[in-house]
């Protein structure tokens, strides 16, 4: 079924970022410049620009040739997509190489672009901003491992604190250590011992960024049979991850289930760096972030008022605009059902509001599959600002909105991520959504004319006499199901 278009679909609003890294070059195109950017194109090539840099101090001819060919392709693709705003940044390999600026000048001449060579401090700052943009309230330390460098940045209260950049990317570390694991550990330790401020982040959270670390996260998911293979905000405890990293140091990483084979060569050293950072900073938990440098560039370009927005709510509003039947009215539904959720904490409200926004996401599917489709899609949507249990909660609530209960055998992921109390909460929210959509037909400005209250031990739905035609058997049944979930008698009355 064709989806409606919004003004944000206009090609002139598309934003592209090319990231020239030490190991890979990547082009990402976003639908628009926003607080919750959605990718419409993502392509990467491993060219190894940083290979040999530790020994020669220069970018190698073979690597530059691969990088040049693919950079020219990326620029051509971006122009074909009518990307008017294309930003190109280069990181550790280019800034540290004696011929790095010569390489950039040639690319600027051939492609008619401007390349910004980021300093170590600028790279650290933008990577940290990427994490802050995707995980509001991030508190602890961001670590971004690229092919050539490691950036560590203190984060808290949406601000950036002390930071450091070190030549500890797997390509550089392999040359500095001769590929020897024990020697690599010593090299990493020598750098980390200089950072006395790492003691101040102990007991907080380490936010891990970078392709090699994400590959390790995928392998760890497989090893623990984790139910949801979504990297962003995958969370693990320090001791558990440390044991896993120790177990893989001497094995063939090409055979490591879940890990990217293209990054197999770098994984042992990437694991050493992560393990030593954990050793020195002693975080209470490690959270992996899919957002980093590129998203930090996007976030940095937004005005302060836009940066203060909620990425989850903005993403869900945009999803509702494209996938729903009518204009988004999640706020109306959330306010209408609020009496069912007294003393609600801020995070619980965010998740309820998100569920109200995406509650109509599966209306165009076959009726027999709407509940399952909505559940599976919400679990895997590429939005941020939400934990894995949060994803499961929203998915479960919208499942109930379509299915009318928690009777599906397919709810495996939610069963492993949520407890019994959260299941009951999601069921109540889903039944309220089901009633609201049935009462209104999914249209805006209808439920607000009625009033849902809990008073004198009863659930009441007050309906103006002029709107009593909205009440029929199907509405009555769904109201009674909601009252049963609340364990209260229910009554629909004329206001």
Image (cartoon, rainbow, N blue to C red):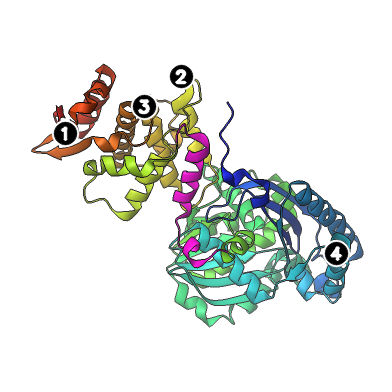
Q: Which mark is residue 368?
A: 2
Q: What residue is pinned by disc 4?
A: 107
Q: Nearer the viewer, mark 2 or mark 1?
A: 1
Q: Answer few, some or many: residues within 10 Å of disc 4's Cα (few below 14, many 20 plus, some between 14 and 19).
A: some
Farthest-out residue, top: 473
Asked whether residue 428 appears in the rendered view, the answer is no
Q: CA distance from mark 2 to mark 1?
A: 30 Å
Q: Answer few, some or many: residues within 10 Å of disc 2's Cα (few below 14, many 20 plus, some between 14 and 19).
A: few
Q: What residue is pinned by disc 3?
A: 441
Q: What residue is pinned by disc 1?
A: 459
Place of residue 454 in the rendered image (x, y in percent of width and height, measured from the top left): 15, 39
Circle 3 sits in a helix, a strand or a loop, which is it?
A: loop
Circle 4 sits in a helix, a strand or a loop, which is it?
A: helix
Which image quarter is the C terminus in?
A: top left
Q: Nearer the viewer, residue 357 or 463?
A: 463
Are discs 2 and 3 less than 8 Å apart at CB? no
Asked whether residue 205 appears in the rendered view, the answer is yes
Circle 2 sits in a helix, a strand or a loop, which is it?
A: helix
User: Left or right: where does residue 48 sit relative to residue 418?
Assistant: right
Q: Residue at x 20, y 34 (%)?
A: 486
Q: Nearer the viewer, mark 2 or mark 4?
A: 4
Q: Which mark is residue 117?
A: none
Farthest-out residue, front: 466
Q: Nearer the viewer, mark 4 or mark 3?
A: 3
Q: CA distance from mark 4 to mark 1?
A: 68 Å
Are discs 3 and 1 less than 8 Å apart at CB? no
Circle 1 sits in a helix, a strand or a loop, which is it?
A: strand
Q: Is residue 157 above or below residue 215?
A: below
Tell whether position 312 is magenta: yes
Q: Which residues are magenta?
A: 302-326
């Amino acid at each position: 079924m064709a989806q409606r278009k919004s003004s944000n679909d206009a090609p002139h609003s598309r934003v592209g970022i090319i990231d020239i890294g030490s190991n890979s070059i990547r082009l990402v195109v976003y639908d628009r410049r926003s607080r919750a950017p959605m990718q419409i194109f993502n392509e990467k090539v491993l060219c190894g620009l940083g290979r040999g840099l530790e020994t020669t101090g220069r970018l190698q001819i073979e690597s530059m040739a691969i990088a040049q060919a693919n950079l020219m392709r990326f620029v051509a693709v971006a122009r074909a997509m009518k990307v008017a705003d294309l930003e190109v940044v280069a990181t550790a390999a280019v800034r540290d190489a004696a011929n790095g600026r010569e390489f950039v000048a040639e690319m600027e001449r051939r492609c008619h672009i401007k390349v910004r060579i980021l300093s170590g401090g600028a790279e650290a700052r933008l990577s940290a901003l990427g994490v802050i943009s995707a995980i509001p309230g991030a508190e602890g330390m961001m670590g971004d491992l690229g092919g050539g460098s490691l950036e560590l940045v203190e984060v808290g209260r949406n601000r950036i604190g002390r930071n450091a950049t070190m030549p500890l990317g797997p390509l550089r570390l392999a040359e500095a250590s001769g590929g020897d694991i024990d020697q690599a550990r010593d090299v990493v330790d020598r750098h980390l011992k200089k950072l006395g401020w790492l003691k101040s982040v102990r007991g907080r959270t380490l936010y891990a960024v970078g392709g090699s670390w994400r590959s390790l996260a995928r392998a760890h998911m497989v090893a623990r049979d984790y139910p949801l293979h979504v990297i962003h905000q995958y969370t693990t405890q320090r001791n558990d991850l440390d044991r896993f990293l120790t177990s893989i140091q001497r094995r063939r990483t090409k055979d490591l289930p879940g890990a990217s084979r293209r990054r197999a060569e770098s994984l042992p050293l990437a694991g050493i760096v992560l393990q030593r950072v954990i050793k020195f900073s002693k975080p209470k938990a490690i959270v992996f972030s899919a957002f980093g440098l590129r998203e930090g560039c996007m976030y940095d370009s937004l005005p302060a008022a836009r940066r203060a927005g909620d990425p989850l709510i903005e993403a869900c509003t945009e999803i509702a605009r494209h996938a729903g039947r009518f204009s988004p009215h999640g706020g109306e539904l959330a306010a209408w059902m609020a009496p069912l959720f007294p003393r609600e904490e801020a995070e619980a409200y965010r998740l309820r509001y998100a569920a109200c926004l995406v509650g109509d996401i599966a209306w165009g599917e076959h009726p027999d599959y709407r509940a399952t489709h909505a559940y599976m899609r919400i679990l895997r949507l590429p939005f941020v600002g939400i934990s894995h249990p949060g994803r499961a909660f929203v998915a479960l609530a919208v499942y109930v909105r379509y299915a009318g209960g928690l009777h599906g055998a397919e709810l495996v992921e939610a069963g492993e991520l949520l407890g019994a109390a959260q299941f009951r909460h999601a069921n109540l929210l889903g039944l309220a959504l089901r009633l609201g959509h049935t009462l209104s037909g999914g249209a805006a400005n209808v439920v607000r004319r009625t009033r849902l209250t809990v008073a004198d031990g009863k659930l009441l739905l007050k309906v103006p006499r002029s709107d009593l035609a909205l009440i029929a058997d199907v509405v009555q049944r769904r109201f009674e199901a909601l009252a049963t979930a609340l364990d209260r008698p229910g009554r629909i009355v004329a206001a």
